[in-house]
């Protein structure tokens, strides 16, 4: 039987491998090496290989989408793009967070990110890719920001059997997302996934609104800025204190 | 503008140590993929170590698109005047 990309594996096998690893990783984090007694090590190793294989099948489609995107971005210069393949642990963590998700449906194993000079150019690229690509879905987090404050336009593209995510951001949207990512890593908290203190998220969301206003050429009124300062003050202990605790561990 | 023009970089970021370590593979995607899996096994589930395989026309571009691995840790405070504490 011929599976994805001419391999002899089936999507069912890939999905079972992802699920097995999700179950294994949960137990591993709970009981450490004891988890090895609850699972067949051969199954774990085999599933590990299947996840790696499934990810590697995204390499070529990802590069093709990336090359197309670079071509479209040339019309909207100065813009830049890079591609990334998702880390094994991050893939499995997503399956843990979303128990009904199949690994073969995960849309961001391969991702491209582009930073464009402004929203108008993002929208121009969006029009271009919608004409030329098979778009499975589009999420416009600029018109409808995530509750976290995340703003960007995401397109999920199908290339052969693989889904590739394309993130289009303006400079300030990108600065915001990278700062949240940096704080997540520094504090060891999945702020990116909505975890951590609500006070921090309220501050981030207000900050994202400020960036959106500024990129649209407006300036925030004094009440807005006062709210931002208040949110900042409230979030500060979490942004600083948690960091201290982590460094001491 | 071919998919093969891309250069591959394995970025290893240890939050306790600061700047990311970058392994460069040029256009050799196969070697980069093999090293990715190898490093993941090496650092599997180690708290505070992030590994990611990135590709772009140059490392300079990676440093801009994935700046969280490369720029110093600072906050949003540079974009407004915080209240005096």
Image (tube, coloured by chain):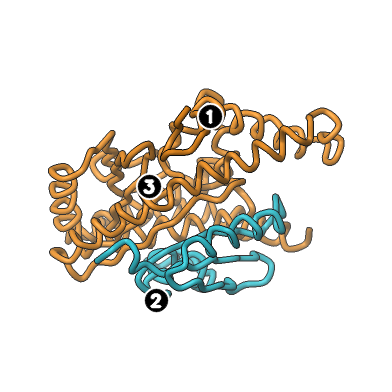
Chain colours: A orange, B cyan
Callout 1: SS: loop
Q: Label 2 vs label 3: CA separation?
A: 25 Å
Q: Label 3 vs label 1: CA separation?
A: 20 Å
Task: Decide: is A223 above or below A140.
Answer: below
Chain identity of mark 1 = A
Q: Which mark is residue B60?
A: 2
What x and y, as percent, mark residue A122? Answer: 20, 54
Chain identity of mark 2 = B
- Foreground: disc 3 or disc 1: 1
**Badge 3 and badge 1 both on one subunit:** yes
Q: Residues within 10 Å of mark 2 (few under 14, many from 20)?
A: few
| Image quarter of residue A17 | top right
| Image quarter of residue B10 | bottom right
What x and y, as percent, mark residue B25? Answer: 50, 71
Determine which residue is flagged by label 3. A150
Q: Is A107 positioned to the left or the right of A67 in the image?
A: right
Q: Residues within 10 Å of mark 3 (few under 14, many from 20)?
A: many
Task: Decide: is A153 above or below A102.
Answer: below
Q: Label 1 vs label 2: CA separation?
A: 35 Å
What x and y, as percent, mark residue A160? Answer: 33, 39
Circles 3, 1 touching at the beta carbon (< 8 Å): no
**Residue B83 seen in the current view:** no
Determine which residue is flagged by label 1. A98
**Badge 1 and badge 2 both on one subunit:** no
Nearer-the-camera pick, B18 or A80: A80
State which tag comes first along the sequence, 3 or 1.
Answer: 1
Q: Is A244 positioned to the left or the right of A14 in the image?
A: right
Q: Is A145 positioned to the left or the right of A215 in the image?
A: right
Nearer-the-camera pick, A19 or A162: A162
């Amino acid at each position: 039987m011929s599976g994805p990309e001419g391999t002899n594996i089936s999507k069912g096998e890939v999905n079972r491998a992802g699920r097995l690893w999700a179950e294994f990783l949960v137990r591993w984090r709970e009981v450490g090496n004891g988890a090895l007694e609850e699972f067949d090590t051969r199954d774990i190793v085999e599933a590990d290989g299947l996840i790696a294989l499934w990810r590697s099948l995204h390499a070529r489609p990802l590069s093709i989408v990336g090359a197309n995107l670079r071509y479209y971005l040339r019309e909207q210069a100065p813009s830049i793009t890079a591609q990334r393949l998702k880390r094994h642990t991050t893939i499995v963590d997503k399956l843990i967070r979303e128990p009904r998700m199949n690994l073969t449906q995960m849309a961001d194993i391969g991702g491209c990110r582009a930073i464009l000079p402004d929203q108008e150019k993002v929208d121009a690229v969006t029009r271009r890719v919608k004409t030329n690509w098979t778009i499975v879905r589009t999420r416009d987090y600029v018109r409808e920001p995530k509750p976290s404050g995340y703003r960007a336009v995401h397109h999920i593209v199908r290339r052969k059997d693989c889904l590739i995510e394309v993130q289009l951001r303006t400079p300030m949207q990108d600065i915001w997302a990278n700062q949240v990512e940096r704080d997540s890593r520094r504090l060891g908290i999945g702020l990116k996934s909505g975890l951590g203190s609500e006070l921090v998220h309220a501050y981030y969301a207000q900050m994202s609104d400020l960036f959106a206003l500024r990129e649209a050429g407006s300036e925030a009124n004094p009440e807005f800025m006062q709210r931002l300062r208040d949110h900042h003050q409230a979030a500060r202990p979490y942004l600083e204190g948690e960091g201290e605790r982590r460094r001491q561990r | 503008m071919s998919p093969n023009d891309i250069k591959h970089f394995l970025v290893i970021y240890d939050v306790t140590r600061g700047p990311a370590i970058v392994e460069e593979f040029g256009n050799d995607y196969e070697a980069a993929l093999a090293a990715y899996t190898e490093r993941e096994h090496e650092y599997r589930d180690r708290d505070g170590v992030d590994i990611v395989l990135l590709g772009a026309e140059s490392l300079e571009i990676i440093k801009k698109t994935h700046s969280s691995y490369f720029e110093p840790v600072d906050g949003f405070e540079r974009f407004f005047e915080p209240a005096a504490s």
